[in-house]
Image (cartoon, rainbow, N blue to C red):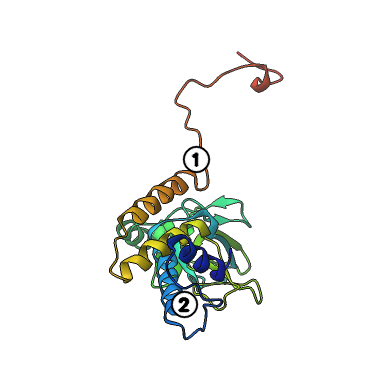
Amino acid sequence: MSLLTICQAALYELSGFEVPSNFYGSTNLTARTCVALVQREGNTLEKEHRWTELITTHTFTTTNGTDYYALPADFRAMAFDSHWDRTNSRKMLGPTAPGRWQWLKSDTASGSAVERFFRIQNGRVYIHPVPTVTGDTIAYDYYSKSWVTKQSDASNVAAWTSDADTARIDEDLLTLGLKWRFLQSKGMPFEAEYREYESIKSELLADNGGKPVIDLGPHRLDLSNLPDTGFGS
């Protein structure tokens, strides 16, 4: 679905409202209202929840003597447990709390530590100890603010640019969100549409990205994980 089909689907389902043939850039009041409201809906969903569809990988290389590096322009939040020093095949530790960060900076011994720590502050990622090598590759995943894909060049952006643009967030959910917001904007009852929207959103969030299995039982020891020699010695 595109911006055009999201808006048209919402209006057709509501029934009784005109359904414009184009929306983005239109002077028609209904079209302009729909574009503004579906933009608000997407912005809200992007901020409120961490959708796996918006996970993006970022890499950069260290510079000798530089301990801070800019976050991507579309950075919303860090994906949990994803910071890696790829060059040295080591997981980075963080995000580091302010108190611990100050302890690290005050501890002369930590300057030569093997582990690398990081913190996020003022649109930058800071690394400790300060890199002494140029060219180490650091990688992490983050949640992007850019929930719209432009039809013109397939780039991801944070706002609609044409009727043909598509959404990275579930488009049926955007349609349901537009329905209740449109009715609300007209001063009409919208409770039933809102309940349906919240129900579908809860289902999507429960399934989003899948969930790992947490096994609290004993580890099974069988022939597939016994060593070739030395077992029991």
Give whichever of 42, 6 is nearer the camera.
Answer: 6
10 Å crowding of disc 2: few (<14), some (14-19), many (20+): many
**Residue found at the very far top of the displayed protein:** 232
Give whichever of 63, 22 is nearer the camera.
Answer: 22
Q: In this rendering, would 178 be left or right of 60?
A: left
Q: Quadrant of the N terminus?
A: bottom right
* Disc number placed over residue 211 in the picture, else none: 1
> Going from the N terminus, do you reach mark 2 or mark 1 first?
2
Give whichever of 155, 164 is nearer the camera.
Answer: 164
Q: Residue at x 42, y 51 (%)?
A: 201
Coordinates of residue 146 in the picture (x, y in percent): 51, 69
Give the CA distance from mark 2 to mark 1: 39 Å
* Disc number placed over residue 197 in the picture, else none: none
Give whichever of 221, 6 is nearer the camera.
Answer: 6
Foreground disc of the pair 2, 1: 2
At label 2, which amino acid type do we have? Ala
Q: Residue at x 41, y 61 (%)?
A: 177
Q: Residue at x 28, y 69 (%)?
A: 187
**Does 113 sit above or below residue 62?**
above
Coordinates of residue 65 in the picture (x, y in percent): 52, 72
Coordinates of residue 189 in the picture (x, y in percent): 29, 61
- Which residue is tagged 2? 31
Q: Quadrant of the C terminus?
A: top right
**Does 138 sit above or below residue 225?**
below
